[in-house]
Amino acid sequence: MNFPLKKINRIAFWASVIGMLAFIFHFGFNQTTLTQQIIDGFYFIVITLGLISTFVRYVEKPHHLKKNVAIFDFISVAYTLYIFYMYLFVGEAFKTDLVLENPMWLIFAVILSFIREFSELKLNLNRVYLNPAQLFILSFLTIIFLGSLLLLLPKATYNGLTFIDALFTSASAVCVTGLIVVDTATYFTLFGQSIILILIQIGGLGILTFASYFSYFFKGGTTYENQLTLSEMTNSQKIGSVFDTLKNIIIITITVEFTAALFIYFSLDTELISNFADKIFFSIFHAISAFCNAGFSTLSNSIYETGFRFNYPLQLVIIATFVMGSLGFPIVVNLVNYTKHVILNFFRFQSWKKTYKPWVLNINSRINLVTTLSLTFIAFVLFLIIEYHNTLEEHSLFGKLVNALFIAATPRTAGFNSVDMTALAAPTIMITFLLMWIGASPASTGGGIKTSTFAIAILNIFSLAKGKSRIEVYRREIAEISVKRAFATISLSLLVIGLGIILITYFNPELGLLNIAFESFSAYSTVGLSLGITSSFNTASKLVLITIMFIGRVSMLSITVAIFKKIKHKNYRYPSEEITIN
């Protein structure tokens, strides 16, 4: 009885894959009326096969299906049947307006069918062939290459794009950097900007996060091998909680991005963007770009664009969004649990009802939060003083405070700019160097060496100064492996950035050392801030910057782990010797 089900599922899956390719062909190339009608007809074949596959699945294996899956299937089937009803019985007006000229309703049904059929595939993350680090790196390389091909489609841009510029843009989007060689606002069509948006979302969370979660959601289980691989890739504390971690990542992302898009929409001036669809797209684009710390904008001058630079509510929403993205998913989850604990205890008026839970806010969250808040506050005060009569001169007192906070927070891998970057004072640029290099918190959508790494380095200095042999904080000792990783990360980051600066200076010496160094730090930390020289790079310099962005996103430590084979634990130790350091 399983053979017909497998065969029908396979046919429906490959039909949905071809349907997705037809969707790309549909929007990527100019179509004649006949070609468009053929494509639309094929869309209906895809969703019909999807309906048959779903029906057979319930007939053959009803006991294997979960409640959540049944709800998804019910909504999907109801939506598809509605499309059929409108097409067959409503009349020519629906066919012309919604199917031939704007078939998004139909395409959405095809996408639902693809998700459902794709989820039935057996996801096998076999560690025999690729370890987690290699799998992680390969997934990013694949998405960057596919993204560059999509951006080369005729209808993705107004005037065409060279392969190197398409590759650069795709790498910048997937690596959530935000450095651009062509203006996103004027060079790319709505279709091209949508491709960039999808690449940002995939790059911010990782394609394996989406694939693994959807597979688990529909199947309700997975192999121990898959859980082991995913636990290393998502930094899960327990192998059994890996899919809880994935679920938290998806829920946090959707919640924050939806809320941010809503606030951005209501903060926009209707005189600047009057069209409803344009406002929706602007809000969604900037919400996703901000949360993923990508820095891409559909405005030519980012938030510094005329008409937006004085929109302080918009700036505050974007600040809150990219700060949430930069904190890291484990810290956000920990903060939510801590807040729930505090609120519940607040409403338990009798002391005997109150609960005591030690370390609700764990040491990882404490260190990263203290470091983040300290760096942001110090930078805010310094930027307010230094830029008060410079780039902040045109703003009111409240505007100065908002923009000082914006330029203090955005170097932490966000990449948006609300002031003229080329007009910043020299001390501000140097402080921005440090902030970009440190970056966001671990397990976040941001880059850099990470706040925890910087904190461990500072704590180590104090420990050595006090004559301690261990790093102790909050009545806990930092594990030796964490200290080793921190200093390996620092060393490798400086090595990559330094080599990048040397190469770009060799290929484009006319651009100036300070500008090149700023660009290299921005690329490695996936920040996206620029002093305006990115578009001036030649092909060799662009390739160097692409490499730096990629290494910064996947981390040099992951690359070294992917290259070198792990040795087995040795049951011996050599005599220790001290090396002269100072």
Image: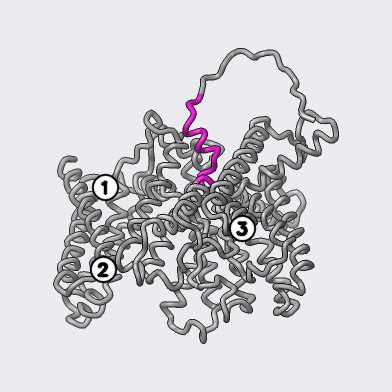
SS at badge 3: loop
Q: Quadrant of residue 416?
A: bottom right
Horizontal and vertical percent for residue 456? Answer: 71, 40
**Could you say which is closer to the camera, residue 578 or residue 6?**
578
Residue matched to label 1: 62
Q: Quadrant of residue 55?
A: bottom left
- Amino acid type of disc 2? Leu
Specify the quadrant that holds the C terminus: top right
Question: At x 25% / y 54%, what residue is drawn?
Answer: 17
Q: How is the image coloured?
A: one colour
Question: At x 50% / y 68%, what residue is drawn?
Answer: 297
368 lies left or right of 276: right
Counting residues from the start of the chain, the first of labels 2 and 3 encountered is 2
Which numbered mark, 1 or 2, is in the foreground of this view? 2
Tell whether position 557 is magenta: yes
Residue matched to label 2: 106
Q: Residues within 10 Å of mark 3 (few under 14, many from 20)?
A: few
Residue matched to label 3: 512
